[in-house]
């Protein structure tokens, strides 16, 4: 067991991401004299991360409170605990299987771990604990408010919170064990490892599709005409065939856990808690037993890549070898890496395409309001109200382009191979443009899709769309320049998994927060100053063109020195 804990600590230090922010696993990407600044920066990042999590917890708490009050009228408030546990367990199971395969089989540390004198269950247990710690972050956001709200509303005693902590810690174990068992069987008896990049891409797209599908389903259920809240409660809580009964059959630990919390003030509650923990222990024992038999057989060769050989014709060779612009060649290289690397594709390209879909789901799920939305198009060019609508549109573009992490991770994605950029006979301007252009193009695609969406749903006048498009272009370029500036200052080059370069890179958080702040500023100013639509258009266009010129010149002046100081 000591080896398992030592390995767990090593995995957390070397690749803990957000859990080990500022730990030993991330060496400085710059020269000496930055330890104090780096520590201060990490403190700021932790505060910002706490604020973001708090912004998610408060609305969830309000929603849980309203559900509790509705269910309490029928004496079924206890069903809220069971439902919450089932939903969390289902989420861990659905998304856990893809994450488990990436961590257990496709991580770059596998080649270093296999030759060590470690048993399969020790490697699996350490990786399982690391994965479990990330699941706790998710559960804290969604299940934590449920426990607190239920305890406060019901006037629960201290034992409720003690039992609640035990349930919280053990709840994700069983669904994660099930996901791990499915992953081990899949990897042992199929050839997924030979097509790991294709699998990662497919798994990521499927996970996103499931999330959007579930979101759309709930939106349609809650927004459908004539939806009766009492009828919804009856569906959730009826004893025979109800959704809650079905889900607690799928996850029996959820039933034991909810009963333990409901009866926390009696010996019966302690008995249910014992059953809950015993069942969790049995599942974990099965996990280690099966892992001892199957893991090594499935992980051998998982880090190798396979490709098909293809004959190249002379015409194709001449086309590939033809001389071209260095900026064009570097840009195409960046685009190919984004499209061919699953982690980069899912977190940059796919997310850029999803923003219009995410924003359109509430509109598409509520067909009654679509007719009313069409009337908005007639006032978008109104001298009194058009300015605020244009400011809102530009604010949305600032946020979505800031949320595009392509430029904010452009240097970080190079990883240990960044030093190659220092040896290539190309100027800094080529590297800068080659990394900005893909980010700008992705933001441009997002903007075009958003414009198409509002043209369909709002029946937007053509002139308004043209103004939004023209004023939006310098905004997109500005956020791309901001992203590359941040990544030049503090790149994350030390990672053992491509996902950590983009998904666990806090450099991507700053442009998103800046886009949110800058997106709100024109809306507030337009509202306070009562600016017209043409005034907003001209002022935003001129302002961001000037900002882009100044920021580009600043990067060209300071960027080469920053690039030289980066150590890979």
Image: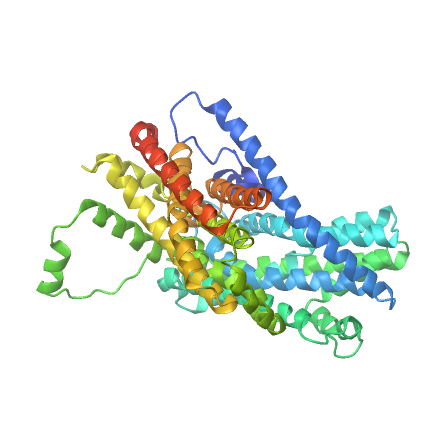
State whether residue 448 appears in this view. Answer: yes
Task: Indicate the position of residue 51 as horizontal and vertical percent values.
Answer: 63, 41
User: Which residue occupies the foreground of this view, 11 or 480?
Assistant: 480
Q: Is residue 192 left or right of residue 45?
A: left
Q: Residue at x 41, y 39 (%)?
A: 543
User: Which residue occupies the foreground of this view, 126 or 354?
Assistant: 354
Task: Indicate the position of residue 161 as horizontal and vertical percent values.
Answer: 81, 48
Which image quadrant: the N terminus?
A: top right
Q: Is residue 514 above or below residue 187?
A: above
Q: Is residue 530 left or right of residue 309?
A: right
Which image quadrant: the C terminus?
A: top left
Task: Indicate the position of residue 243 as horizontal and vertical percent values.
Answer: 72, 73
Q: Residue at x 81, y 54 (%)?
A: 150
Task: Indicate the position of residue 503 as horizontal and vertical percent values.
Answer: 48, 48
Q: Is residue 75 above or below residue 27?
A: below
Instruction: Residue 238: name its quadrant.
Output: bottom right
User: Which residue occupies the foreground of this view, 62 or 241?
Assistant: 62
């Amino acid at each position: 067991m000591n080896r398992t804990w030592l390995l767990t600590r090593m995995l957390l230090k070397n690749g803990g991401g957000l859990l080990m922010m500022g730990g030993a696993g991330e060496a400085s990407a710059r020269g000496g004299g930055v330890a104090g600044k780096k520590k201060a920066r990490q403190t700021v990042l932790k505060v910002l991360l706490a604020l973001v999590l708090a912004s998610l917890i408060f609305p969830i708490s309000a929603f849980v409170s309203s559900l509790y009050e509705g269910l309490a009228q029928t004496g079924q408030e206890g069903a809220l605990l069971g439902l919450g546990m089932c939903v969390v367990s289902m989420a861990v199971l659905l998304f856990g299987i893809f994450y488990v395969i990436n961590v257990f089989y496709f991580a770059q540390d596998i080649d270093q771990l296999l030759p060590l004198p470690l048993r399969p269950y020790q490697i699996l247990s350490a990786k399982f604990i690391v994965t479990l710690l990330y699941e706790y972050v998710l559960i804290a956001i969604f299940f934590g408010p449920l426990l607190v709200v239920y305890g406060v509303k019901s006037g629960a005693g201290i034992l409720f919170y003690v039992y609640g902590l035990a349930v919280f810690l053990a709840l994700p174990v069983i669904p994660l064990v099930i996901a791990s068992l499915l992953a081990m069987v899949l990897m042992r008896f199929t050839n997924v490892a030979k097509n790991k990049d294709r699998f990662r891409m497919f798994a990521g797209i499927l996970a996103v599709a499931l999330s959007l599908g579930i979101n759309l389903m709930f939106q349609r259920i809650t927004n459908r005409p004539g939806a009766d809240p009492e009828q919804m409660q009856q569906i959730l809580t009826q004893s025979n065939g109800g959704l809650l009964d079905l889900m607690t059959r799928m996850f029996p630990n959820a039933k034991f856990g909810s009963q333990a919390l409901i009866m926390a003030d009696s010996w019966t509650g302690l008995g249910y808690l014992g059953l809950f923990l015993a069942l969790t222990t049995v599942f974990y024992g099965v996990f280690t037993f099966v892992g001892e038999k199957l893991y090594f057989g499935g992980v051998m060769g998982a880090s190798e890549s396979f490709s098909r050989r293809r004959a190249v014709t002379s015409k194709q060779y001449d086309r590939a070898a033809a001389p071209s612009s260095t900026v064009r060649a570097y840009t195409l290289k960046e685009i190919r890496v984004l499209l061919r690397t699953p982690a980069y594709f899912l977190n940059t390209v796919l997310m850029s395409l999803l923003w219009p879909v995410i924003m359109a789901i509430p509109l598409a799920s509520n067909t009654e309001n679509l007719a009313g939305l069409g009337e908005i198009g007639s006032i978008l060019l109104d001298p009194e109200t058009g300015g605020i609508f244009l400011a809102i549109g530009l604010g949305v573009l600032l946020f979505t382009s800031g949320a595009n992490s392509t430029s904010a991770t452009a240097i970080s994605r190079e990883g240990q191979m960044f030093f190659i950029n220092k040896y290539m006979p190309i100027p800094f301007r080529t590297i800068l443009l080659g990394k900005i252009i893909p980010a700008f193009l992705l933001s441009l695609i997002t903007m075009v899709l958003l414009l198409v969406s509002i043209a369909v749903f709002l029946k937007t006048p053509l002139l308004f769309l043209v103004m939004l498009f023209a004023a939006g272009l310098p905004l997109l370029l500005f956020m791309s320049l901001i992203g590359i500036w941040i990544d030049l200052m503090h790149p994350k080059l030390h990672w053992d998994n491509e996902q950590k370069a983009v998904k666990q890179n806090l450099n991507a958080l700053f442009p998103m927060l800046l886009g949110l702040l800058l997106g709100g500023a024109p809306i507030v100013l337009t509202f306070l100053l009562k600016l017209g639509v043409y005034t907003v258009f001209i002022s935003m266009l001129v302002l961001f063109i000037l900002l882009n010129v100044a920021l580009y010149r600043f990067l060209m002046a300071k960027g080469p020195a920053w690039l030289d100081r980066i150590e890979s």
